[in-house]
Image (tube, rainbow, N blue to C red):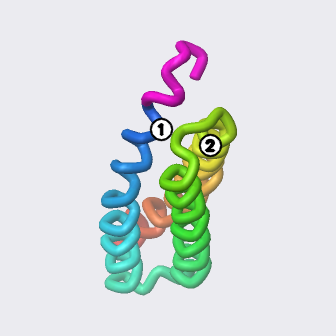
Amino acid sequence: MAQGKGKDEVGKVIAFLADYVTKHFKAEEEIMEKHNYGGISSQKTEHAQFIRDFSDLKKDFGKNGVTTHLVLQVQNKLCNWLKNHIGNEDKKIGMFLKKSA
């Protein structure tokens, strides 16, 4: 966004996430189930919420195209997801798997 390319990139990000999120979450949940990860329920809940949020963004994109509001929403959702979920919750899975190996 700082380089003025936010609107150009949002379409690419939405297209990428449409495929990636489903495959990634499924694979991650299968690993958690296979190794009896205790936090799987909260992980699944967070994954489902991200999918709902992403679906809303995708609908907005389809209806209104790329708007400044959409660019900001995508940036906000992705940054929060990276920082909070991946940076905290997914790291817990990694630590659990290392301990159980």
Q: Quadrant of residue 69?
A: top right
Based on the picture, tell me whether residue 2 belongs to the magenta stretch: yes
Labels 2 and 1 touching (C-beta < 8 A): yes
Q: Main secondary structure of the magenta part?
A: loop
Q: Is residue 19 toward the left or the right of residue 3 in the image? A: left
**Please, what secondary structure does the residue beneath circle 1 have?**
helix
Image coordinates of residue 78 in percent, x first then y, are 57, 46
Toward the viewer: 15 or 97? 15
Residue drawn 42% across and 43% down?
A: 13
The three-letter code of the residue at mark 2 reads Leu
Q: Quadrant of residue 92?
A: bottom right
Q: Which residues are magenta?
A: 1-8
Toward the viewer: 50 or 83? 50
Q: Quadrant of residue 94?
A: bottom left
Q: Please tell me the numbered disc located at residue 70.
A: 2
Image quadrant where one finds the N terminus: top right
Residue bearing the label numbered 1: 10
